[in-house]
Image (cartoon, grey):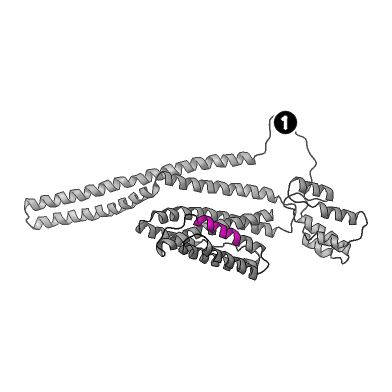
Amino acid sequence: MRPKLEYFRMGLRLLYEWLFSILLAYFFLIIFVKKTPFQFIELILLGVYLVSYLTRRKAPNNFVAFLIHIVCGTAMFFLPIPRGDAIVIAMIIFYQLWESFIYIRTGKLLILNDVPWPTLLISIIIYAYGYFTHSSLLTTWAYYIPIMLIVIYFLIIYLDGMNKYVESTRDVTGLPISRIVKTNSLIVFVILALLITGILLGNWLDLDAALYKLGRGILSVIGMIVLVIRIIGRIIYSIFHTESNEEILSEENEFGDIAGLYARQIRDSSEFVFKLIAVIFVIYILYKFLSWFIRLLMKKRQINGDIIEKADMRIRSIVNYNSINKNNTGSSREEKLRKLYRESIIFYRYDIRLSQNKTPQEIEKELYDMEIADVREITDIYRDVRYGGENVTKEMLRAFKK
C-alpha cells in the first residue's frame, strides 16, 4: 500500500508542476520573447519533468542529479526548437535541479500545508494580461489550467493526509487499511465529481458572460438610484427657476433614454440567477444519486431466504512490532535472519491479513497470487534455517536486502 501511495503522490505533484510550467512558459514567450510557443513545448516539458523526477528518485547524490540536469538543459539548445523556447525550458530545468537537491536531502516529498496562493495569484495575473491584450492563447490556458490545478491540489492534500495516517500506524497490524483507503477515496471522488460537474455546467451555460451581465446590472441599479436623485433635484430646481419647454423636453428624453438603458441591463442580469439555480439543481440531483450509490455499495448484501450460518469469530490481534523488536535483539546470525524475515513480511501487513495461524508458505502463496510481491526466495531460506537446521551464511542475509 505504501509504495503505491508514494507513486500516486509523486505523480500528482509531477502533473501539478508540469501544468503550471506550461502556463509560465506561455506567459514568458508571449510577453518577453514576443512569439508563439513551439507547438510541441508541452511534450518537451513533460519529458523534462519525467527525467527530473526519475533522477531525484534514483540518483545516489546531488552530483549525479546535477550532471543529469545539466545534460538535459544543454540538450535543449541542440534540439530543432527556437532559441527563446530553449532558454525558457532551460530555466525550468534549473528550477527542477533545485527541487531535486531538496528531495535527495530529505528523502521524501514535502507535505502541502497551505493553499497555493502564489500559483493562483500568478494564474490570475496571466489571465488578466491575456484579457487586456486580447491574447486568446493566454486567456484560454489561464482559465483551464488553474481549474485543473485546484482539482489536483485537492487530490494531493488527500493523499498527503492518507500517507500521514499510514505512517502513524505503520507499527500496528490488524487494521483494515485497504478498506479505509477505498472508502475515503470513493468519498473524495464524489466531491471532485460534484466540483467538476459544476465547472462543466458553468462553462456550458456560459456563466462567465452571465456573471459579467450581473455586474453591469448591479452598476445599473446604482446608476438608477443616482438618476432618481438627479430627477428629484431637477424637479426642485425647476420650481424656483423658469425654463423653456424645449429644455425641459430635452432633459426628459435624456432621463428616459438613460433609465431605459439601465432597465435593460438590470433585466439582462437576471440571466445569471436563473443559470445559477439550474447549476445548483443539477449538482443537488447528482449529489443525491451518488450518495445513494455509495450507500448501496457499502451496504451488506442479504437476500430474503438465505441460510445464514454463524461462523467462528476471529479476534484480529493488534500488535506493536516495536516492542517485539526490542525484546528480540539477538546477536546470532539465526536470530538476525529471523528478524529480517519478520520485517520483510510485516512490510506487506496493509496488503494482506497477517496472523499467527498462517504458515510462511501460505503467506508466500497469497502474496504471489495477488501479484503483490515474490517472497519465495526468502521464504525458502527462512524455512531451511528454521526447520531444516541449516547454518546461516552471508549469502542468505544478502538475499533479504535485494
Residue at 64% across / 55% down in the picture?
7
| Disc 1 target residue | 306
How many marks are shown on the rendered structure? Answer: 1
Q: Is residue 378 left or right of residue 74?
A: right
Residue 234 magenta: no
| Crowd class of label 1 (few under 14; some 14 to 19; many from 20; radius 10 Å) | few
Q: Is residue 99 visible?
A: no
Whether residue 16 is situated above or below residue 207 in the rendered picture? below
Q: Is residue 51 magenta?
A: yes
Q: Residue 27 is drawn in which quadrant?
A: bottom left
Q: Secondary structure at mark 1?
A: loop
Quarter location, residue 290? top right
Vertically, is 273 above or below 62? above
Please name the residue shown 63% across and 63% down the image. 55
Residue placed most toward the observer, 123 or 162: 123
Image coords of residue 237 (percent x, y): 12, 57
- Regarding residue 44, the answer to whether it shows in the image is yes
Question: Residue 72's image quarter?
Answer: bottom right
**101 left or right, relative to 210:** right
Q: Nearer the viewer, residue 212 or 290?
A: 212
> Residue drawn at (79%, 62%), measured in percent from left and top?
323
* Residue depicted at 82% across the width and 55% down the height: 378
Q: In front: 9, or 358? A: 9
Span of residues in magenta: 37-52
Give amino acid for label 1: Asp
Q: Position of residue 145 (x, y in %)?
A: 48, 54
Residue that extends furthest to the bottom in the rendered view of this protein: 63
Q: Is residue 354 left or right of residue 97?
A: right
Outermost residue, top side? 305
Residue 349, percent across and down? 75, 53
The foreground one among 332 and 60 is 60
